[in-house]
Amino acid sequence: MRSCFTCKLFPRHHLQALFFPHIARSTKGSASIINRIDSAFVNYLPGKMASQQTAPLKIAIIGSGNWGSAIARIVGGNVAKDTTGKFDKTVRMWVFEEQVNGRKLTEIINTDHENVKYLPGMKLPETVVAVPDVVEAAKDADMLLFVIPHQFILRTCKTLAGTIKPTATALSLVKGLNSPEPGKIGLISDVIKEALGIECGVLMGANVANEVAAGEFCETTIAFRNRKGSAYRDAIQTENFRVSLINDVAFAELSGALKNIVAFGAGLIDGMLGEKGGNTKAAVIRIGIMEMIDFAEKFFPGGKRETFLESCGIADVITSSYGGRNRKVAAAFAANPDKTIKDLEAEMLNGQLLQGPGTAEEVNLFLKQTKREGEFPLFTAVHQICRKEIPVQALLDQLRNHPVHQAHVSL
């Protein structure tokens, strides 16, 4: 047997007695069995383990919008600097092909190393390669990062089904919910997991894409049901983009989705009251967080309330209520009652999709189906305002009469 520190501390017969007592006690164990045991020990000794090299992990990013490009900038930079051999030096990013100033967007990204449409002014590392075919982008990937609007998740997964490595894992950065049919609600991570047959975690946090891409300090939360989340942390974390690892996938993902409704409500206050609405906006944020917690605990039981204290919870609600596209469009919607949300989305978001109104509608249909609308007045009011069923000012009435202000009643 190999001479090493482990062998000196634990002679062969001690190791055999420790791990294979039924053979060590037997006088009938053959020499061949003992030799196989010796071989097994050698394979698990520290020196042997250290000498075994695994292939570098290949990363694919499914999506190339504002947030997808920001994440590609971080991941591409990290793999370029990686000296451990843990990650492959090419990060493939699926780009929905479109023409920008007479050139293909993939050509621009691969030649000029910039997504001039969705993340202008920010250079992408040369390790990031734009691929117009989603199957080709995900081919042989060990780690898949999904960063596309939640409306396109199921269609994209159906395209990828049967083409993904069975040992791959996925991470969803999608802040939305799955609504397979009116009145039903599910998690995007579950859609990915079931469609592709692989484990899927989530990344959620107080992460405005442009600020993340610019390298401004912020935090995020990765939730995974097992230890596989550590590889994603290694690929994503930087000095100014700090990652916390938890295992509460459901509550982390719900936080990222439901905060879109709260942020839209906060934006309505901005558009209605302007700088004079600070106290009212704080009430929307507080009550919104309480409704988020109540929704998660009632319909997705088993999570941890403290998850809402992570970056994916309260921090994301705050940053989204003061910045980000939901607040921005909601403020314009309140200030311009003659315009529709679709009009403002087209005018203000440069091809990006708004998540707040869509999430509010999906949640409302679910609450109607379960006859629980009255338990979530803020969520319900935001949906009705988006549909122009009630005026923006009616949001104030919902705040005044919210159950949290009734004696001995709390969420």
Image: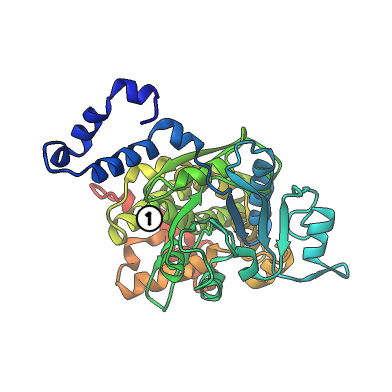
Q: Is residue 285 visible?
A: yes
Instruction: Give amino acid for label 1.
Output: Ala
- Neighbour tally class for label 1: few under 14, some 14-19, many 20 plus, Cα within 10 Å: many
7 horizontally vs 135: left or right = left
| Residue with the mark numbered 1 | 250
Rendered image quadrant of residue 179: bottom left
Residue at the far right: name it: 102
Which image quadrant: the N terminus? top left
Q: Nearer the viewer, residue 194 or 397?
A: 194
Q: SS for tag 1?
A: helix
Residue 272 visible, this orientation:
no
x, y percentage for residue 51? 50, 36
Question: Is 64 above or below relative to 278?
Answer: below
Residue 406 picture location, percent across and down: 29, 51
- Front position in the image: 154 or 36: 36
User: Residue at 54% across / 75% down in the picture?
Assistant: 155
The one nearer the camera, 212 or 294, is: 212
Horizontal side of 130 relative to 9 (left or right) equals: right
